[in-house]
Image: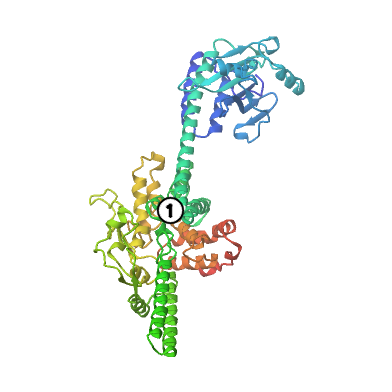
């Protein structure tokens, strides 16, 4: 036997069957596509002591065979598979240009017929075209002689590929024909291999489908809000970057933190779905840039009312002049009143932005302004939808009707039909749910003391975490993805137990859940595409997160790793604007 042979053939029939069983067991446990193909080919070569072998897989369109792995002992050739060496040969077409089956090639003929083909000497066969083989032999100084070509059939009898062996050898290394008694074993091995390969292809197809579903959910959120959609795409990337830093740590608190291939996939799924509950949150709440914003900024309505009041002042002044009043005094009074209305509207507009804290004095002024009246002469019940008309609780008023500039009306309170948690819910949340409604009252919204969101709107935004967990817990995740709800549902928890929705402490949270929280916060602080807040520089974001560490809101060890590993900088260089990237004094946050 030559030294080039990669493995020895089994000596007895019993040895062959035992090896076939062991190979089948090994194939069923393999997870890596390339390793599986190599195992198949090397075992087939070992059974026959073949000098060379090739595995082809059918192309996605089912019209050809592509080279997946090529081995030849005598030529020292190892292409494809785990070698990383590309295979320069193009796919072999299963059909000709005229659409007829390609039976001139031995591998395509075996695939088309679904039958094994054994040839003692390729140079003595006319039914197949071996001109390419002859040219290869002449170039490489090789002699291709015996061939065994076996189709790989899956559970349904569909051919998914072909295994081809070249030049069987006897124990002395002499090339011989493939023996009749060994062919059934190779066919059995091919059948086992096809089933194992098909299972892997099905698993991979399921992963691709699930990955596409995750992208579809992010796309749905993106369609509602381009700001949260970007967030859903960036947070997973940052999460994997930070997890990689923890995984590669040689010492310190994360020296023993390691993720398997399954866990990496589990983390990518969890981070991709961490905000899936936002599909239930109205976009006009998620993107509320001003206090009066719903589907549009209702400040435009308020401005129109001010314009009506100003016109009324002009009209009243002109009427008074026509009645014999002092023009000069009336003009002075008119101008003073118009200036006051301009100032009042500017104040209301400033309140609408939400950039300045609303102290008691500002709220009192807002209330005084709200009492200014204007005259409505048109019916406010015309042109309403059935739902909007159904919210009207007060009787129609006789026209003309006196209205205030700002109002909180009963019809401003809109029920939100999101189902509450059942009293005996299995998720264990202890949070109290307030009234499930939106209050669109103008004075109520303008009086929000900080930011643009009302208490109810803040709840509904926070509620997306509850919905995320409920949605994920309802999915029949396999064992390898069982931690997805926990990892995805914990990124608003705080280390001191004051977060939501479960109020978990640091010790109750896994490392992936804690690092996802850091990724979520840093992305949100530095996001450049959110209209309701100014984007922050890297140093500003790190400073805020440093305060969160001091207040025991985020994990101090992961935050230190976030800084020392340079993950924050790598992410910033890829996703932030140049004017956001500045120097960070790490010494202020470490030690």
The relative height of residue 152 versus residue 244 in the rendered view (above or below) is above
Q: Pick the residue in front: 491 or 313.
A: 313
Q: Pick the residue in front: 400 or 231.
A: 400
Residue 483 lies, in percent from the top left, at: 39, 46
**Other-residue count near label 1 (Cα within 10 Å), few / some / many at <14 / 14–19 / ≥20:** some
The relative height of residue 522 versus residue 335 in the rendered view (above or below) is above
Q: Is residue 567 rendered to the left or right of residue 347? A: right
Q: Residue at x 45, y 62 (%)?
A: 556
Residue 217 lies, in percent from the top left, at: 44, 46
Q: Which residue is mark 1?
A: 511
The N terminus: image quadrant = top right
Q: Is residue 256 rendered to the left or right of residue 441? A: right
Q: Is residue 49 visible?
A: no
Q: Pick the residue in front: 465 or 243.
A: 465
Q: How many marks?
A: 1
Residue 175 lies, in percent from the top left, at: 67, 14
């Amino acid at each position: 036997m030559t030294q080039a042979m990669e493995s020895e053939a089994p000596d007895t029939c019993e040895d062959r069957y035992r090896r076939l069983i062991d190979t089948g067991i090994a194939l069923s446990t393999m997870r890596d596509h390339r390793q599986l193909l190599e195992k198949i080919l090397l075992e087939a070569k070992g059974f026959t002591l073949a000098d060379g072998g090739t595995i082809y897989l059918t192309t996605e369109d089912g019209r050809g065979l592509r080279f997946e792995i090529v081995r030849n002992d005598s030529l020292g050739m190892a292409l494809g598979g785990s070698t990383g060496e590309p295979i320069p040969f193009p796919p072999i077409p299963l059909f000709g240009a005229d659409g007829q089956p390609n039976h001139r090639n031995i591998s395509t003929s075996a695939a088309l017929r679904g039958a094994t083909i054994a040839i003692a000497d390729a140079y003595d066969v006319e039914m197949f075209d071996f001109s390419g083989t002859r040219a290869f032999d002449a170039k490489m100084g090789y002699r291709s002689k015996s061939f065994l070509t076996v189709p790989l059939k899956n559970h349904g009898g569909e051919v998914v590929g072909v295994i081809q062996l070249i030049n069987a050898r006897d124990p002395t290394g002499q090339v011989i024909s493939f023996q009749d008694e060994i062919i059934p074993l190779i066919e059995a091995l091919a059948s086992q291999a096809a089933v194992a390969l098909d299972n892997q292809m099905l698993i991979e197809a399921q992963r691709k489908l699930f990955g596409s579903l995750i992208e579809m959910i992010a796309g749905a959120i993106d369609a509602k809000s381009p700001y949260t959609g970007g967030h859903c795409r960036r947070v997973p990337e940052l999460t994997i970057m930070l997890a990689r830093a923890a995984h590669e740590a040689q010492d310190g608190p994360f020296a023993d933190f390691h993720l398997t291939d399954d866990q990496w996939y589990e983390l990518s799924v969890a981070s991709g779905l961490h905000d899936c509950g936002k599909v239930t949150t109205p976009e006009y709440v998620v993107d509320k840039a001003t206090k009066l914003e719903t589907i549009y900024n209702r400040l435009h309505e308020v401005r129109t009312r001010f314009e009506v009041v100003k016109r009324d002042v002009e009209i009243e002044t002109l009427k008074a002049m026509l009645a014999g009043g002092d023009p000069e005094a009336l003009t002075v009074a008119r101008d003073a009143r118009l200036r006051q209305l301009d100032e009042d509207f500017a104040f209301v507009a400033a309140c609408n932005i939400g950039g300045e804290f609303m102290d008691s004095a500002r709220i009192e002024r807002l209330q005084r302004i709200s009492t200014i009246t204007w005259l409505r002469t048109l019916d406010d019940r015309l042109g309403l939808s059935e739902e909007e008309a159904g919210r009207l609780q007060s009787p129609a008023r006789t026209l003309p009707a006196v209205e205030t500039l700002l109002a909180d009306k009963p019809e401003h309170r809109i029920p939100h039909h999101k189902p509450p948690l059942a009293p005996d819910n299995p998720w264990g949340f202890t949070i109290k749910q307030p009234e499930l409604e939106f209050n669109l009252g103008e004075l109520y919204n303008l009086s929000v003391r900080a930011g643009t969101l009302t208490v109810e709107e803040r709840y509904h935004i926070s509620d997306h975490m509850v919905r995320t967990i409920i949605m994920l817990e309802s999915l029949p995740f396999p064992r390898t993805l069982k931690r997805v709800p926990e990892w995805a549902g914990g990124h608003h928890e705080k280390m001191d137990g004051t977060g939501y929705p479960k109020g978990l402490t640091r010790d109750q949270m896994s490392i992936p859940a804690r690092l996802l929280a850091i990724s979520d916060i840093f992305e949100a602080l530095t996001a450049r595409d959110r209209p309701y807040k100014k984007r922050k520089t890297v140093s500003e974001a790190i400073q805020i997160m440093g305060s969160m560490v001091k207040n025991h809101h985020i994990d101090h060890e992961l935050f230190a790793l976030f800084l020392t590993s340079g993950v924050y900088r790598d992410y910033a260089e890829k996703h932030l604007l140049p004017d956001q990237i500045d120097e960070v004094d790490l010494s202020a946050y470490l030690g």
